[in-house]
Image (cartoon, helix red, strand yellow):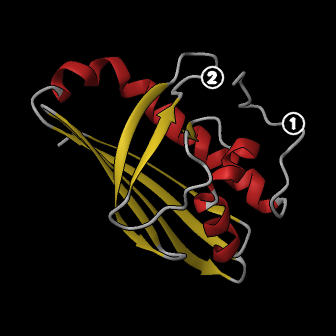
Amino acid sequence: MPSFYTEIEINAPRSLVWSALVSKREWLRWNTFLYDLDPDRPFAKGQSTLLSMRRVPGDEETEFKALIALMQPEVCLRWVYSAPGFRSEHVFELQDIGVDRTKYTHQEKIAGALSKVFLPFIRQDEQQGMKRMAWELKQYAERGGQRSRRNRWSGNR
């Protein structure tokens, strides 16, 4: 099963990182990879959510409807997107690694017959998008929830 993975250490408490990660309305302030098309609807296990992804700044967004499979506050958020012949699972995890220091990991697992068709086209861009999101989350959380003025990943939205 193909997968993508990124991790980053964030000099901020896990509670602050979690808040930024699950406060979908706040994504507009820092996240150029994922967008929520219904930001006022909070994440909840068993609930679907309409999301959009921009793998490369300036490219068109890809919309998808994901099902929240797990939500363990300040620890883990997992959603699954399924379509005939394709399944994608995103897992976001937070771990304390010291006083006010958090390890953030984001993994995506892709499966299904059509994954072999799509994977060559999205592999590099997907990995870069996940890394960009991790870096943006780090910058945002380390500034106490304030967007960086010099966000090197910024793109038009």
Q: Is residue 94 above or below residue 62?
A: below
Q: CA distance from mark 1 to mark 2?
A: 15 Å
Is 53 in front, or is 153? 53
Q: Is residue 77 above or below residue 122?
A: below
Q: Mark 1 or mark 2: name the one nearer the start of the chain.
A: 2
What residue appears at the point 14 percent right and 32 percent down from the top-left corner?
Answer: 84
What residue appears at the point 80 percent right and 36 percent down from the top-left corner?
Answer: 151
Q: Is residue 108 above or below residue 70?
A: above
Q: Amino acid at mark 1?
A: Arg
The residue where tag 2 is placed is 57
What residue appears at the point 63 percent right and 22 percent down from the top-left corner?
Answer: 57
Is 124 in front, or is 63? 63
- x then y, percent, for residue 2: 23, 39
**Crowd band around label 1 with a 10 angstrom C-alpha radius: few (<14), some (14–19), many (20+):** few
Q: Quadrant of the C terminus?
A: top right
- x then y, percent, for residue 6: 47, 49
Q: Quadrant of residue 116?
A: top left
Q: Helix or strand or loop: what does disc 1 sit on?
A: loop
- x then y, percent, for residue 10: 67, 63
Which labelled disc corresponds to residue 107?
none
Q: Is residue 145 left or right of residue 125?
A: right
The residue where tag 1 is placed is 150
Q: Amino acid at mark 2?
A: Pro
Q: Is residue 78 left or right of residue 26?
A: left
